[in-house]
Amino acid sequence: MNARRQARLETLCATDRPLWEQGIVFAGMDEAGRGPLAGNVVAACVVMPPEPLIEWVDDSKKLSEKRRDEVYEEILRVARYVGVGMASPEKIDRVNILNATKAAMKQAAAGAKAQIYLIDAVSGLGLDGEERGIIHGDALSYSIAAASIVAKVTRDRQMLDADRLYPMYGFARHKGYGTKEHIEALREYGPCPLHRRSFITHFV
């Protein structure tokens, strides 16, 4: 591991290491897909061990797709717990995106049995443990960053499946976000069952 990656890992672990050293069981949590016009919002909850540290764990948005896929597989190998939850477009339309995200996070954490939950930007989930909402947590906590990778890879793969069902929208390329290509396709073909009706009112 080069010095730059080592320094980045140490920065990420600054939030986690004191908890590891105290023997506290804690989880990192994050979501993917709050902003897109289509698809599920996906949440992940992970309990990571202090060793071995995975070199390329980082905010998922900073990694290439290939690197994310590789790190995702490593996380699944070493994590003590990995949980995934999701909320459908219908649920997002029914309860709003924040409440749908909280429901997905609660589902992801259902089997974690952690004393503390480090959560990227969100709080008030009603978990059986202390909740610590951390703004930009995926850039400040190793465990939250690992959760961000699990959530994003899971959701991206769902959108690749969606692209095979509805190839006219280009989901494989933009993953449901409101790109020019996506909006043009939405206007030409209308919405499909994966579109969030509450998100597309300005486009159809």
Image (cartoon, grey):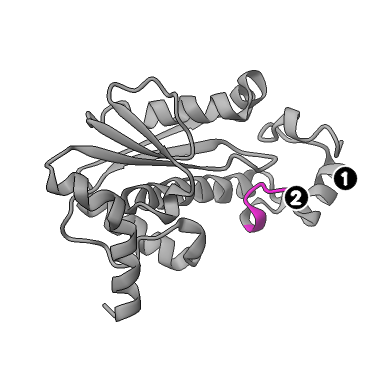
Q: As displayed, is residue 83 above or below residue 69? A: above
In the image, is 203 to the left or to the right of 170?
Answer: right
Question: Circle 1 is placed at which residue position?
Answer: 188
The secondary structure type at the circle numbered 2 is helix
Which residue is at a point 17% across and 60% down the rendered structure image? Answer: 52
Is 68 or 102 nearer to us in this picture? 102
Q: As displayed, is residue 59 above or below residue 161? A: below
**Counting other residues with Cα less than 10 Å from the Cα at mark 1, is it few (<14), some (14-19), or many (20 or more)?**
few
**Counting other residues with Cα less than 10 Å from the Cα at mark 2, is it few (<14), some (14-19), or many (20 or more)?**
few
Query: What stretch of residues is rendered in magenta?
Result: 173-178
The secondary structure type at the circle numbered 1 is helix
- Residue 96 percent coordinates (x, y): 63, 24
CA separation in Å, label 1 and label 2: 10 Å
Q: As displayed, is residue 65 above or below residue 26? A: below
In the image, is 24 to the left or to the right of 39?
Answer: left
The numbered disc on residue 21 is none
**Which picture quadrant has residue 111?**
top left
Q: As displayed, is residue 112 above or below residue 167? A: above
In the image, is 176 to the left or to the right of 12?
Answer: right
Which residue is at a point 48% across and 32% down the rendered structure image? Answer: 86
- Residue 63 percent coordinates (x, y): 47, 65
Specify the quadrant that holds the N terminus.
bottom left
Question: Circle 2 is placed at which residue position?
Answer: 168
